[in-house]
Image (cartoon, grey):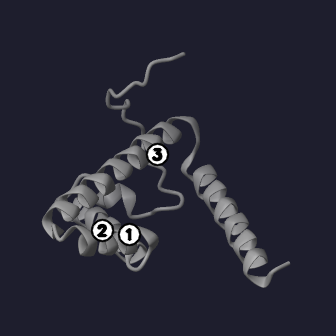
Amino acid sequence: MTPLNLAPPKPIAPDTSSHPTTATTSGTSSGVFNCFLSTFVTIFLAELGDKTQVATLLMSAQSHEPWVVFAGAASALVATSLVGVLIGRWLTKLLTPRTLELATGVILAVVATLLFIDVAGM
């Protein structure tokens, strides 16, 4: 079994074919801010009203310790985000950005189809 390598990856030239602004904004303060902002907005909107937020709401109401629940929920979100970042970093060493985008699209389409079939009762 190979140990998990947490060392920073060797830098590679950015793939500008699907993201033409990558070369001009990568590493600049505006590029970093744009990356942060787009990540924040995407995750924030995706998490609104999902099962994690409902569970957090219920735990806060039951425990009467909202700040402790907030700290636990925030820590859990940070931990799961770290797992996603590490897996994403690992996958970028194995696959091209285009392949990752296609695989993600296929996976999301399959999940959407399965959900539709489930809701439709087929």
Q: Kindly identify the amino acid type of the residue bearing the numbered disc 3.
A: Gly
Residue at 34% of width from left, 46% of height from top? 82
Residue 98, quarter of the rendered image: bottom right
Confirm whether residue 42 shows in the render: no
Considering only order in the chain, which callout, 2 or 3, is on the residue closer to the N terminus?
2
Verify CB contact (< 8 Å) between mark 1 and mark 2.
Answer: yes
**The label number, if any, that marks residue 55 in the structure image:** 1
Tell me the residue that label 2 is attached to: 59
Front residue of this view, candidates 17 and 80: 80
Query: What separation in Å lies between label 3 and label 2 (alpha carbons)?
Result: 31 Å
Verify CB contact (< 8 Å) between mark 3 and mark 2.
Answer: no
Residue at 38% of width from left, 69% of height from top? 55
Judged by depth in the image, the label closer to the viewer, 3 or 2, is 2
Query: What separation in Å lies between label 1 and label 2 (alpha carbons)?
Result: 6 Å
In the image, is 7 to the left or to the right of 18? left
Residue 96, quarter of the rendered image: top right
Tell me the residue that label 3 is attached to: 88
Front residue of this view, candidates 65 and 74: 65
Mark 3 surroundings: few (<14), some (14-19) or many (≥20) residues within 10 A = few
Q: Secondary structure at mark 1?
A: helix
Mark 2 surroundings: few (<14), some (14-19) or many (≥20) residues within 10 A = some
Expressed as whole percent of the image width and height from the top left, the position of residue 2 reads 51, 17
In the image, is 70 to the left or to the right of 38? left
Q: Secondary structure at mark 3?
A: helix
In the image, is 96 to the left or to the right of 90? right
Q: Kindly identify the amino acid type of the residue bearing the numbered disc 2.
A: Met
Q: Secondary structure at mark 2?
A: helix
Front residue of this view, candidates 60 and 100: 60
